[in-house]
Amino acid sequence: MKKNKVFYLYACCIPVKGSQRSLIMDIQRNNFYFIPNVLFEILTKYRTKSINKIKKIYQQEQAIDDFFDFLIKKECGLFMNSLSVFPKMDTGYQSPYLITNAIIETDRRSQHNYTNIFAQLSNVNCIAIEMRFYDFIALQDLIKIVAQTYDSTFRTVNIFLPYSAEYEQDAMKEFLLQNARVQHLIIYNAPQFIFTEEEQNSSCLEYVPYTMDGSCGHVSPRYFRANREMLCESINRNNCLNRKVCICKDGSIRNCPAMVQQFGNIATCDLKHVITQKTFTKLWNINKDKISVCSDCEFRYMCHDCRAFITDSNNIYSKPKKCNYDPYTTAWN
Ligand code: SF4
């Protein structure tokens, strides 16, 4: 009989409590399900209690049955005799990379030495770079720059280019086929939206009719990610700035392109030295639980943070400015 059993919530289903409601973050399916806060309490405070005992505590037989029926239907768990052989998932955060992602900005005035930049990023084990071009660059010149990544630690290279008639589809598709590290090529300010995916190497070519500016820091359910990497990083670190670096148009080293503070120039500084200084890493430790309002939000472990655009410029712990969700009313304004 199920009344003497306990409910095992799968380790990949993480209950997260918000001010007015909670949710279950299903990191295996990249999905989430809203639940009332009382079910969060049942799944955490009373997780080892039998169904019978839970019903006695709440004096709500039918409602408790409905809760567990909902969880079974969502394939979030099952009834067991004991939870003793099911430890909770470790949500600690570790990374072998000093830097995981880097943005490299370039405009017509930039005097980047890409050999130096790529070597310095490889020296900190960077695995992904995003190259943002603000002015036209000839395809032949782009090919020469990307060729310099061949001996790097980068697994992926994403590129943003301003639209030009020179970037016609066949040429760009050929570029993607010849440069397997380039996973995503986005041509912005394009006359129309076009999306193609290369079957051979799963790379994407996108022409988008909007600019590059203005999207940074924007918070929307469209950008939520419910996976283990996001969960663990969000619980322990700042999920936007942790282990990220930006090499700006003028070569200055910053936490992100939208931040004003500079930490020297890539042309003259040792990047590894710069990114291991406390002044550079101090923002890495501002996790969502330390940020006002976000700390009460049920989305906080799947929602990207932003420290560049915040509601109170005098309070580095204030809510991201471009978020219009209110966890105290559960309304998107
Ligand atoms: S309140 Fe914070 S955690 Fe919630 S959606 Fe907005 S930015 Fe994300």
Image (cartoon, rainbow, N blue to C red):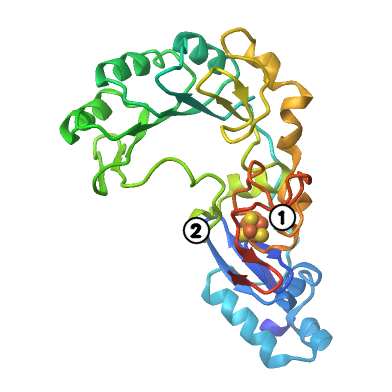
- As helix, strand or loop, the secondary structure at mark 2 comes to loop
Q: Is residue 105 visible?
A: yes
Q: Report whether residue 11 is seen.
A: no
- Find disc 2 in the rendering and name its residue: 29
Residue found 74% across the figure and 69% down from its top: 19
| Residue bearing the label numbered 1 | 88
Q: Point out residue 226 in the picture as x, y percentages from the top left corner.
A: 55, 55
Q: Position of residue 159 (x, y in %)?
A: 38, 31
Pick the front one: 4 or 88: 88
- Could you say whether the residue bearing mark 1 is in a helix, strand or loop? loop
Tell me the quadrant of the picture where the C terminus can be found.
bottom right
**Amino acid residing under circle 1:** Lys
- Say few, some or many: other residues with alpha carbon within 10 Å of mark 2 (under 14 / 14 to 19 / 20 or more): few
* 175 up-or-down from 48: above or below: above
> Measured from the top left, where is residue 190 in percent x and y?
27, 42
Q: Which quadrant would the N terminus be assigned to in this image?
A: bottom right
In which of the image's four quarters is ligand 1 placed? bottom right
Residue 64 coordinates in the image, percent (x, y): 69, 85
